[in-house]
Amino acid sequence: MHVAALYDVHGNLPALEAVLAAVPDDAAIVVGGDVAAGPFPSETLERLRALGDRVRWLRGNADRELTPGEEGLAPAEMIEWVRGRLSDEQIAFLHGLPPTVELELGGLGRVLFCHATPRNDLDIFTSITPAERVAPAFAGVDADLVVVGHTHMQFDREIARIRVVNAGSVGMSYDEPPGAYWALLPSGGDVELTMTPYELDTGEWPGEWPSATRAEATAHFETLALGS
């Protein structure tokens, strides 16, 4: 089984279309959360749902926060704009997704897919976060590899003796150069951190589309992680 890990699409339909054109035809797709919160929420969600059983879903914080009463990290004005462009059924679908997906992959062993950490969908860590700070979030995990997203930047590192790979963000990446970032887990091979170029179109999105550099985003997320 080949698996394409597509995380943090954030309603960016042009980025998703570019990536889907690059994903091998025989690959399963793990959608790693934060699907709809962006310029084309309904269109992006339905494009992925149309792929049927090929897709394995898990829920991100921005999916969960579309349900009124849920607290989290996404700006309230963004959530309200997106919520107004989704049906009640679509919001319920996103809220009902599981927090994790686990697959056995030849060459990689037992792979756990989650949005932020195995503990929850809000934990923040980056490529430079000290391993000892984030290790409690991986306590008790029985997997050879954990694939995460959430901070929109790719990395490949070890935490608590577990290999942890951030697949990056398809729709709102802070990696450089600009593009749609995702990961391919080939059968019998190693993880391939991948970028697909696309032309950005933010449609009727209100305000400025996020455009921080990797260094700026890393500094911002490290500040959030420390609670300062």
Image: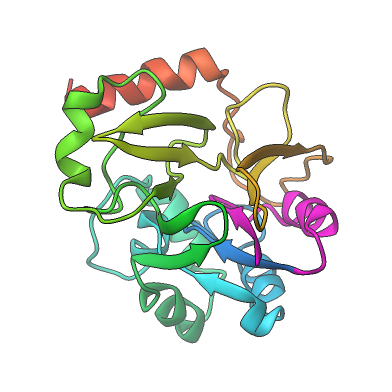
Q: Is residue 48 above or below residue 165?
A: below
The residue depicted at 73 percent of the width and 55 percent of the height is 16
The residue depicted at 36 percent of the width and 72 percent of the height is 98
Residue 44: image x %, image y %?
Answer: 67, 65
State the quadrant of the N terminus.
Answer: bottom right
Q: Is residue 200 left or right of residue 29?
A: right
The residue depicted at 57 percent of the width and 18 percent of the height is 213
Q: Is residue 43 above or below residue 118?
A: below
Across the whole image, how many numbered discs are drawn on residues? 0
Q: Please give the range of residues in magenta.
A: 1-26
Residue 219: image x %, image y %?
Answer: 38, 15
**The image quarter in which residue 138 lies:** top left
**The image quarter in which residue 210 lies:** top right
Q: Is residue 69 left or right of residue 47?
A: left
The front one of 139 and 39 is 139
The residue depicted at 66 percent of the width and 58 percent of the height is 187
